[in-house]
Image (cartoon, rainbow, N blue to C red):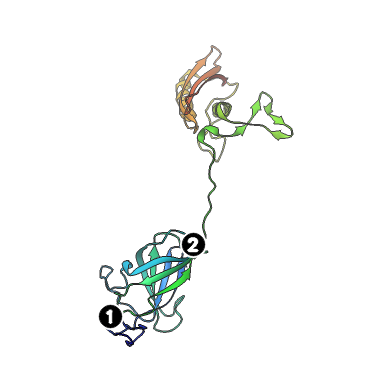
Amino acid sequence: MLGGYGAEAFGDPMGGGGGLHVDRALAVGGQVVRVVLNKAPKTKSSLAINDGLNSSNYGLTIATGTGTTPLSVGVLQVVQFPAFGLLTAGEVGVDVQVDRPLVVGLSYLVTVSTGLVASDGDSMGSPYGATFVGAARPTFTRRNNRSKNEIIDWDSGDNGLTVSGGDIGTVTGLPSTKLRCMRRTLTAKNSFAHLPGYGIGFAPKTPLSTARTGALKADLAQQLRQEPDVDSATTNVRQDVRGFVTVTENIKTKTKATLTFTVAAS
């Protein structure tokens, strides 16, 4: 009936407003909102429909701004005064975790179910909810507009890097693939501290023993396939009577293009 007593403004269906109500709410983490109640709710089981530990008793909507509505997924803890966001003795905070960041710039409304009861058995009354602002700043990621088949590399020739108009030239596509495969072939293994295992064990202008050619051939083919735009690779190692080595590489890219070239490895 109208005019019921308690915090409920116009009385609940039984004519008596409950003494348990929401004082305020605030974000205390990127995905955590602290719902501050004027007194302790029942906290015995997260499976009880009238319990403060049951996350289904807390609903969220976006009050100001545009975004995806967060869903309550759990209750992390119940905090007692004094604590952040609790202003007076007797207030109790319930930390509710949601499924997505509560973003800065958006305003949210958290509403507590009327089925929630206090630890002393008192029922829920008005106000049932409170608004708060998000605390998580959105992160921006750079979109990669280039596919793995358009890797950019420095252009180089017999005399080193190619310079045009004061800038170092670049290559993409098949020239970039060939350049990177040659670099792996002619770089001594572990030459780069930040790329463990990069390179092959060929020693330029140094004779190579026949016993090592098989292992180096297998290592080279495996490393060539590590290039992101290489689909498959086979190699052939030829050693002349002096012990010097020439490597032929047959490479198929992920765009079905083929590359065949010879490198004087040692």
The residue singled out by tag 2 in the image is 103
The residue lying toward the viewer, choosing from 203 and 185, is 185
Secondary structure at badge 2 equals: loop
Relative to 196, say whether 103 is above or below. Answer: below
The residue lying toward the viewer, choosing from 231 and 221, is 231
The residue lying toward the viewer, choosing from 15 and 253, is 15
Q: Position of residue 117 (x, y in %)?
A: 29, 78
Q: Is residue 18 left or right of residue 152?
A: left
User: Is residue 187 shown to the viewer in this render?
Assistant: no
Please, which residue is most extreme toward the top here? 241
Relative to 8, say whether 237 is above or below. Answer: above
Which comes sooner in the sequence, label 1 or label 2? Answer: 1
Number of residues whose C-alpha sits closer than 10 Å to that of mark 1, classed few (under 14), some (14–19) or many (20 or more)? few
Q: Position of residue 15 (x, y in %)?
A: 28, 84
- Tell me the number on the disc at residue 13: 1
Residue found 32% across the figure and 67% down from its top: 56
Q: Position of residue 42 (x, y in %)?
A: 30, 77
Quadrant of the frame with the N terminus: bottom left
Residue found 68% across the figure and 29% down from its top: 162
Q: Amino acid at mark 2?
A: Val
Number of residues whose C-alpha sits closer than 10 Å to that of mark 2, classed few (under 14), some (14–19) or many (20 or more)? some
Residue found 35% across the figure and 69% down from its top: 58
The residue lying toward the viewer, choosing from 120 and 128, is 128
User: Is residue 233 shown to the viewer in this render?
Assistant: yes
Relative to 198, say whether 34 is above or below. Answer: below
Q: Amino acid at mark 1?
A: Pro
